[in-house]
Image (cartoon, rainbow, N blue to C red):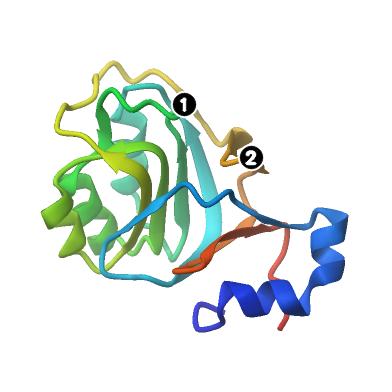
Amino acid sequence: MASVATAEVCDANSHLIQSGELRALQPIFHIYGQRQVFSGPVVTVKVFEDNVLIRDFLEEKGNGRVLVVDGGGSLRCAILGGNPVQQAQNNGWSGIVVNGCIRDVDEINSCDIGVRALASHPMKANKKGLGDKHVPVTIAGTRICDGEWLYADADGILISRSEPSV
C-alpha cells in the first residue's frame, strides 16, 4: 500500500470519506526523514512537553507500525530528537507523526524513516514520564485511534479504520 499515492486512495474511496472511515489530516506538518512515503498500523501516545513515553515506544520493535504522538501542538520545546528516531529506524518503525516539535533535524533527515512534525525547536523536553499510551488522540482536525491505518506521502496524511482499496 505504501507505493499507492494518498490522492489515488482518496479518489478510489469517496464512499469511505463520506462515511468518515477514511480521513485526511489538515496539512500542517513538515516532512522529515528519508522516507517520503510510509504507512502502517497506528500506535498512539499523548504527552505534553515530555518525551519519556515516546522513547519507551521507540525502544520496542516497530513491526512496520506508525507512532502518532499528540504533543498538544506545543511549539515551546522538541519532544523527539535524533537518537530516538535512529532507534525507531533500527527497530523497524515505518514512521512517526508528531503534533509538536522535533530537533536534530540533520540527524533525523539521514534516517530511513518517515517523520512528520509541526516544526523544529532546539530546546529539549522534560523527562517526567507523564502522558497516556494507546488513547484516542485528535490532531490536525482528526480523531485517531490505536489500530487504525496511517498513509503518508508528499500530498498529505490519511487515517483509515481499515486498509482502503485502490
Q: Is residue 103 above or below residue 46?
A: below
Q: Earlier in the sequence, mark 2 or mark 1?
A: 1
Task: Report how far apart the C-alphas of labels 2 and 1 lie in the structure.
Answer: 12 Å
Along the line of sight, the residue nearer the viewer: 163 or 154: 154
For image coordinates 14% across by 33% down, the residue present is: 122
Looking at the picture, how far across and down is residue 127, in whole percent?
24, 20
Badge 2: residue crowd in 10 Å (few <14, some 14–19, many ≥20): few
Q: How far across and how far down the image is residue 47, in percent?
A: 42, 26
Q: Identify the image quadrant of residue 86.
A: bottom left
Measuring 61% from the left and 35% from the top, which residue is drawn there?
138
Q: In what quadrant of the picture does the N terminus appear?
A: bottom right
Q: Is residue 69 left or right of residue 124?
A: right
Amino acid at circle 2: Gly
From the top left corner, tell me how far across and down residue 3 is, in percent.
50, 83
At label 1, counting other C-alpha atoms closer than 10 Å, the crowd grade (few under 14, some 14-19, many 20 or more) is: some
Q: Is 72 on the left or on the right of 117, as rendered?
A: right
Which amino acid is tagged 1? Gly
> Which residue in the protein does label 1 denote?
72
Q: How many marks?
A: 2
Which residue matches tag 2? 141
Which residue is pictured at 21% across the width and 34% down the height?
A: 121
Which numbered mark, 2 or 1, is in the foreground of this view?
Answer: 2
Q: Residue at x 18, y 27 (%)?
A: 124
Residue 108, given in percent of the width and then of the height, sits at 19, 55
| Label 2: element kind | loop
- Secondary structure under tag 1 reads loop
Q: Which mark is residue 129?
A: none
- Does residue 40 appear left or right of residue 115 in this picture? right
